Image (cartoon, rainbow, N blue to C red):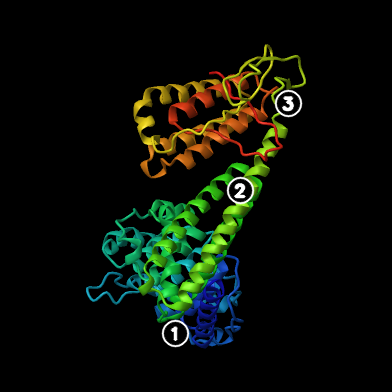
Amino acid sequence: MIDVIRNCFNSQLKSIAQYLQANYHSESPESGFGNYVFHQTNSHISFEVANDIDITKLSPNRFSEAPVLAAVGYSLACGRQFSEDFLESWAKGLTRLSGRNHFPPDRTSFFYRPTELLGITLGISHYYKSQPDHSKWLQDILTEGEQRLINSDIWTFLLSAYTASILSVTWRARSWPLVKEMTVDELALAKWLCSIKPTLAKTLGLAQLELSLDKALLEHCIEFSNSLQDSARAALLFFALKRTIAQTLQLIWNECEQICDNPQKSVEWLQTTCDNVHTVTQHLQAQLARQSDIGASNKHNMQMLLQALSILRSDTNILEVEISEHIRIHSSLYIGNNKGTIITGSNVTMTHNQNESITNETRIHAPNSSIGFIQSGSGSVSSFSQNIGQNVDEITRLINSLRDMAQEFPEAEREEALVHLDDLQEDINTPDKRKPQRIKTRLVALFTFATMSAGVLAGAADFSNNVLELSEKLGVSIELSHPQSTPQLPPSVP
């Protein structure tokens, strides 16, 4: 599937590049805009741009044409150098243009052609950089033009709003349609503006939509073949598609790094994955139950998948034992089998009824020491929701108490504890997340934090005991699975 998607996008980018190369023309404002798209993002156009020698041989009479004036403007914006005579002829053409009616009833003015408007504006801003008075006429046009384009199509409005910003004229945001209703050209233009002009994109209300824009752009390019209209739109689509793919891959890589480097992220990812595996397993089992709906080959494949899922369950059980052992070692809490002895590196005494099982009630006296405790009890998953409802006041009190305790920890430990508590609170308050196994994962994370902080943080033992009490109120036991040869930790007395 990944190869199919990769080939799909790669094929589209190659097709767009070929279109740009075949349709490049030095006198075309659309081609000039295409070059400017890549210049503004410090990226490279997918082919070598012609030297534009022909444009320097234009007759001075051609500078009365707005498209030609715009083409030269794009070249100036991209760093092209021209002779003084050539630029003087071009400037005279701008003067003639400034004297015309810019808002004719038939909308034939360059103002209503956004690629020409942008090219002319870029040329003026670069040529008259030290003489801003020469751009005053164009500033007035862009100021008045906002209301004339407020109901125009998205492509025209966005490109014209960007043009206005070049001369420090700010257009207000307008209402946008649903992202999924935007055309691929509009999506690409919006993505480009988010990349090169984030402040403007935020003002126009585009920055808040960028993730949705990316999703819609990729979905469109996967599902539909793109019909290219001109070089301007083709260049934007090439840039936006390539940039979105790169950012998406980087985001995936960043998430992978976080999962590898952050134990809490690893646990959350594993929990979500296990939930998904459980759902898929149930679906496969339900499908297999309907024998008549499944062909022989598909049935064999599904049985193989179920076997693989069974192996995965075995692997996760082994992983759980390894994690439990790691926690036991790092908690600095070692208990002899039925000997009533705790080794914590300091003088600690424990009273234990030798006639009772190790999993019965045990009282620990640990003055001036911080010890973590693990409760071993089955709990009742079936009464989970009922326990929450019956004990909601106590649950809230215990969580608030844990928050208060965390405030006394050093900054790093305080933030870690509060993150765990926030996650637990969210799961309890969200019906879709209120699952015993999910809540248990949060409680184990809190308890692990406390036990590994024992002897380092004052109040870690009280924090542990509160977590254990909270687990009782929630009806979720905290258990660590050990091999039979591994000593078991006794339950605490709240």
Q: Residues within 10 Å of mark 3 (few under 14, many from 20)?
A: few
Q: Residue 62 shows which numbered tag?
A: 1
Mark 3 vs mark 2: in front: 3
Residue at position x 62%, y 31% in the image:
449
Q: Could you tell me which secondary element the residue under label 2 belongs to? A: helix
> Quick one: label 1 or label 2, which is nearer the N terminus?
1
- Residue most extreme to the right: 345
CB atoms at circles 3 and 2 under 8 Å apart? no
Mark 1 and mark 2 residues within 8 Å of each other at the beta carbon: no
In the rendered view, tell whether residue 175 sits above or below residue 15: above
Residue identifier under label 2: 317
Q: Is residue 285 left or right of residue 314?
A: left
- The mark that comes first in sequence, 3 or 1, is 1
Amino acid tagged 1: Arg
**Label 2 environment density (alpha carbons within 10 Å; few <14, some 14–19, many ≥20):** few
Circle 1: element type: helix
Q: Earlier in the sequence, mark 3 or mark 2?
A: 2
Residue type, label 3: Gly
Image coordinates of residue 279 in percent, x first then y, are 44, 56
Q: Do the CB atoms of the residues marked 3 and 1 lie less than 8 Å apart?
A: no
Image side of residue 156 versus residue 340, left or right:
left
Residue at the extreme top? 367
Viewer-side residue, 40 vs 58: 40
Q: Residue 103 in the image: state x and y as whole percent.
A: 27, 69
The 10 Å Cα crowd at callout 1, few under 14, some 14 to 19, many 20 or more, is some
In this view, 369 is above or below 277: above
> Spatial distance from mark 3 to mark 2, Cα to Cα?
25 Å
Numbered badge on residue 336 = 3
Task: Measure the alpha-carbon separation of dots 1 and 2.
Answer: 79 Å
Q: Which residue is depicted at the point 31% across and 59% down?
A: 176
